[in-house]
Amino acid sequence: MPGALGRAVQLLASGDWEVWLITWTSLRFSLSSALIACLPGIPLGVLVALKRFRGRRALLAVLNSLMALPTVVVGLVVYSLVSRSGPLGSLGILFTPRAVIVGQAILAFPIVVSLTASGLSSLDPLLPEVLTTLGASRGGVLWMTLREARGAVLSASLAAFGRVVGEVGAAMMLGGNIRGYTRTITTAIALETSKGEFELGLALGIILMVTSLGVNALLHWAVKHE
Amino acid sequence: MSEPASLFSVRDLRVSFDGRQALRIDSLDLEEGRVSVLAGENGSGKTTLLRVLNGLLAPSAGRVSYRGAPLTGDGRRAVRADSVLVHQVPLLFRGTVGQNVAYGPKVRGADRAEAGRRVAESLALVGMGGFERRRASALSGGEKQRVAIARALAIRAKVLLLDEPTANIDPEFRRSIEALVRAAAAAGTTVVASSHDREFAYRVCDRLVPLEDGRIAPLRENIFRGEVARTDEQFAYFRTGSADLRCPAREGDFAVAVLPLDDVIVSREPLSSSARNRFRGTVVAISQEAGLLRITVDCGFPVQALITRAAAEELDMAGGREYCVTFKASAVRLY
C-alpha cells in the first residue's frame, strides 16, 4: 500500500464528507448504546456494590466474565431475535441503527455494572450509614454515593464507550454496513480493506485510534482525579 | 426532683453477627435530657448499641423503643428525625468543610441562609471557626473528627449519639468536646456517648453505663460531681454536696471524684484508723447484687458501698439507721 498513508491524511485534511458521515454514525451509535447501558447499569452497579445479598459474589463473577462477551456472539443472538423469522422480527429493526445500538448496549452493560461496582468498593462501607443518620433518603444515599465515586463511574462509562466504538462484530451483523445509514468506522475499515482500498480505511483507522487513545487518556485522568 | 422521662427503652435486646452474640441487654432505660456514657473496652458492644438506638441496625431479637414507640415501626422514623450518630472513624464527603457541615441541615429542609448560619455556629463550637472553605480531605484526623461532630451539631438533633467522640481528638481539644456535650445537655439535648476515655466519660456523664462483652455490668464506683474547694500540702478537698472529701493533693481543674464501692467501709461506730474520710449518714437504700448488698448512705451526699450478707447481719443493717462511712483519701480519684 505505497503512498496510501499520505493519501489517507490528505483525505482527512480535505474534509471528505463520507469520512465524517461514517465517523458521526459511529460516535452516534457508541454514545447512544453506552448511554443506554449506563442508565440502568450505574445504579445497578451501585446496588451490587452496597447491598449484601445472597448470590452477590456469583453475580459479580458472571458480570465480570460477561465483560469479555464475544461481539459476534452478541451479534448472532440479537440477529436471531430480530430477524424476520425471529420472535422480535415484527419490530423490523434488523439492519437499522436501532439493532446496532441494542447489540452494543448489551456489550456495554456488563462493563458498566461491573466496573461501577468494583470502583465503588474503594468507598468507605460506612458511607450509606453516615448519610442515613444525617437524614438522607434512599435516593439521597444513591445520589451522594455516585457523587463520591464519580471518578469510578466516569471511568466505567468511558470503558463501555471504548469497548463499543471499536467493536466490529455486532455492528456488521446487525447493521449490515449500509452506506450512509449503518456504516460505522469499524465496518467501513473491514469493507474497504477487503476491497484493497486502503486510504479510506487508513483515514478511518486514524480517527478510531485518536478516539480510543483520547478515551484512554480521559480514563487515566478520571482515575487520577478520583 | 422528679425522675427524668425514659427516652429509649431496651428490653431483652439481642444482636448477633454471623452467629456471634455482640449484644445482650435485658433491660436498659436512657433518660431524656441527660448525658449517658457507655463505657467499655473495644468489642464490648458500645458501637452496636448506638447503631441500634439510631435505627441503623435491626436487633436480632428484643424490643427497643423511642418515646414509647418501637423502633421496628413508627419509632424508627421518629428516632431518625430526632437523632444523629457521629461515628468513631470520621467520614467526610468530598468538597469543603462547609459543604460537609451543611449537608445535614440541607437534607433536613433548612434553606441556604439557615444552613450557612448553622455551619458557622457548629464549627465555632468545635473550635474550627473559619474552616468553611478548607478541603475536607486536607484535614488532620483530629480535625476531621471535630468537623464530623460539627456536622451532627448543625442538625440540632434532640438526641446526639456519639461513638468515641474523643478517640482521635488532640488533648487540647478534649475539653472543648466535653464542654459542648455539657452545653448540649444544658440546652435539653439528650446525649448518649460511648467512650473508653475514662476521664472524658467521668467528667461528661450524668450516668455511666458499663458494658462488658455486650452486657450491662453494674457500676462499681461512686461518681461525685463537684470541684476542688481548696488544697493544702497533704490533700485536695473536693466539695460535693455539703461535704469535703479528702483526696490526694493534685493540681488540676477537676470536676469529678471517683470512689470504688469496694473501698468504702461501713461501720456502726466511728473507726479510729488511718483513713482520712469519715462521714456519718442514714441508710436510704439497700439492694441485692450478685450475693452482696449494695447500700446507699446519705451523708449529705450519697455514698454507695458493697457489703456481704454476714457484714449486714452483724451491723444489723436496715434502712433509716445511722452508720459511719470510712474511706481512704488515696481511694478517691479525681478527674
Image (tube, helix red, strand yellow):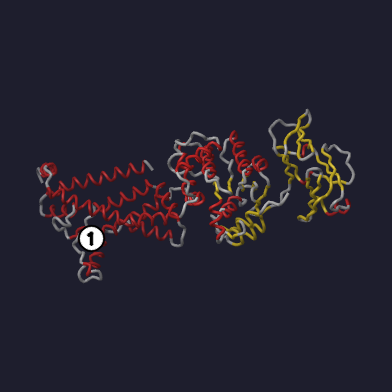
Relative placement, left or right, of B270 versus B84 is right
Q: Camera-side residue: B230 or B52?
A: B230
Relative placement, left or right, of B282 versus A222 is right
Residue A194 sits above or below residue B175 on the image: below
Across and down, in percent, residue A142 comes to 42, 53
Task: Name the residue rendered at 89%, 39% in the picture.
Answer: B272
Picture quadrant where residue B299 is located: top right
Residue B194 sits above or below residue A191 on the image: above
Residue B73 sits above or below residue B277 on the image: below
Tally of numbered tags? 1
- Which chain is disc 1 placed on? A
Residue B193 sits above or below residue B66 on the image: above
Callout 1: helix, strand or loop?
helix
Task: Name the residue rendered at 18%, 45% in the picture.
Answer: A206
Residue reaching furthest to the top: B233
Task: Name the residue rendered at 76%, 55% in the picture.
Answer: B289
Residue under label 1, please give it.
Answer: A98
Q: Camera-side residue: B140 or B257?
A: B257
Q: Disc 1 residue type?
A: Arg
Across and down, in percent, residue A111 comes to 33, 54
Q: Camera-side residue: A172 or A175?
A: A175
Across and down, in percent, residue B49 comes to 60, 53
Can residue B90 be seen? yes
Relative placement, left or right, of B246 versus B45 is right
